[in-house]
Every structure is written in C-alpha cells, then in structure tokens.
Image (cartoon, rainbow, N blue to C red):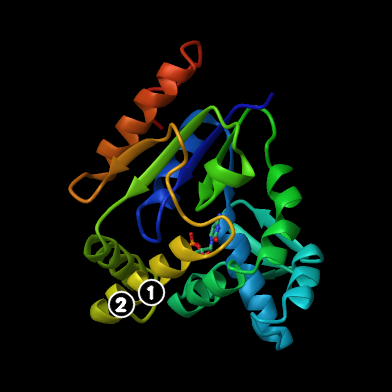
Amino acid sequence: MTRIITIDGPSGSGKGTISRLLARRLGWHMLDSGALYRVLALAAGRAGIDPDRAAELADLARNLNLEFSGEKILLDGEDVSRLIRTESCGNAASKVAAVPEVRAALLDWQRACAKEPGLVADGRDMGTVVFPRADVKIFLTASPEERALRRYKQLKEKGLDANLSNLVAEIRERDDRDRNRSVAPLKAPAAALEVESTALSIDEVLEQVLEQVKKTFPDLQIPECD
Ligand code: C5P
C-alpha cells in the first residue's frame, strides 16, 4: 500500500504551503485537489456550463485534458496556473465542487495519484472521502480573518488585485458552502491531528506535522531540511 498523508482544511489555512513543503521534504508526490476543481470551474465557464447542469459538468470533469507539470497546470496544453488562482475562480470552484456528480467523476483521477514512494494530498475531503485509509490525517485551521490576511498577501505577491474586507466576506461564504454541502462537506476526519495555525508560523506548523509523520513512520528517513 502506498503511504498517504492527507492535509484538509478551509480556504487559506495554509494547506497548500504545508503540503508542498512536506512533499518536497519527503520526496513524495503531491495532489493539489483544489486545483482540479478550479480548472474544472475555468473550463465550465469557458464552455458556458452553469453549476446547475450536473450531467454536463460531470462529463466535462471526466474528459478534462489536464496535466500537472512541476509547478505548472496545463489545460488542453495551455498553462492556466495563474488564471485559476483568482478569488473568483476559487468561488466558482466551490460551486462546481458542491455537485455530487462532479465529485464522483473526479474520484478515480485523484486516487490514481497515490504512487510510490508516497503521496501528500491537499484538499477538503482527502482524509474523509478520497483516501479514508490514509496513514496520517491532518486538519489545518485558522481564523477567517487570519486566512483572509494570508490570502491578501499571497495575491499581492502574485501581482493580483485584492481587497481585505471583500476577502474576509468571500472566505466566510466559501467556508459556509464547503461545510454545509450535502456531499463530502469540509470537516475534520476521525483521528485527524487538528492544527490551529492562527498564531503559528509555517515552520511551527510543519514541525507539528512532521512529528506526527515520524510517529507513524518511525523508519522513514526524513532529511533535516532542504
Ligand atoms: O483549496 P482551494 O481553495 O484551491 O479549493 C477551491 C475550492 O475547491 C474549495 O473552496 C472547495 O469548494 C473545492 N474543493 C473541494 N474539495 C477538495 C478541494 C477543493 O471541494 N478536495
């Protein structure tokens, strides 16, 4: 069985950063499942398919010509890495992600990412639905205000437009939709290590996660740092 670490949590909790650092440190594969829903939302927008047209969306999901190439994400060969990181794309993603047929259509693709030597999977339902038998499950949270502030800084660094009070409102709205949808709602998996990161640095979060990884895999060789 391939070793799997899942990192779930709400938008802006730092899952992406921690997952990337952890995967790099361990030399494992990484699944950014949010990117999958973001690309689908982009493709649906381009094809003029609304979130209420479930069958067409699921069809589109099954036939996505998607490739993760290093840091780049290619849709039909086009680099959409930057395009999918906007807040509007994140919001559109959370609408298509609430469609049960879409989630079912993307399950096999996600599970096929579990390859040797191991996988770090980042998302909302990695430990609950996609990889319920994962070896290590982390649930990462932070206050909505702190998450909005982190997102604000990220967007600014990327040269994208951002407004802090709009971000807080959007994060709350997205949390609400992700937590209250009928399929695969955002929630802490049973037996997950919950890390509340509002007052923690990235290094401190990574340290807590690594402690858990070492406990679970005592024989795993983990390089001290990059
Ligand atoms: O993590 P990220 O912000 O990129 O995710 C965008 C949206 O995709 C989330 O708000 C959520 O609705 C959806 N998503 C999901 N399940 C996942 C990952 C993301 O529903 N495993």
Quarter in which the N terminus is drawn? top right
Q: Quadrant of residue 210?
A: top left
- Identify residue type, mark 1: Glu
Identify the residue shown where x is 42% and y is 45%.
Answer: 188
**Residue 75 appears anywhere in the view:** yes
Q: Quadrant of residue 77?
A: bottom right
Query: For mark 1, what is the residue?
Result: 173
Residue 184 position within the rendered picture, expressed as x and y whole percent measured from the top left: 56, 55
* Image coordinates for residue 225, horizontal then vertical, percent: 37, 29
Secondary structure found at label 1: helix
Residue for point 66% across, 70% down = 40
Q: Residue at x 72, y 75 (%)?
A: 54
Q: Residue furthest top?
A: 219
Q: As displayed, is residue 179 above or below residue 220?
A: below
Callouts 2 and 1 close, C-beta under 8 Å: yes
Report helix, strand or loop for mark 2.
helix
> Is residue 76 among the parts visible in the rendering?
no
Task: Decide which of 152, 79 is in the foreground and name it.
Answer: 152
Instruction: Please state which amino acid type lies under the numbered disc 2.
Output: Ala
Q: Could you tell me residue 129's position as x and y percent?
A: 60, 46
Q: Residue furthest left?
A: 199
Question: Dot 2 corresponds to which residue?
Answer: 169
Q: Residue furthest bottom?
A: 48
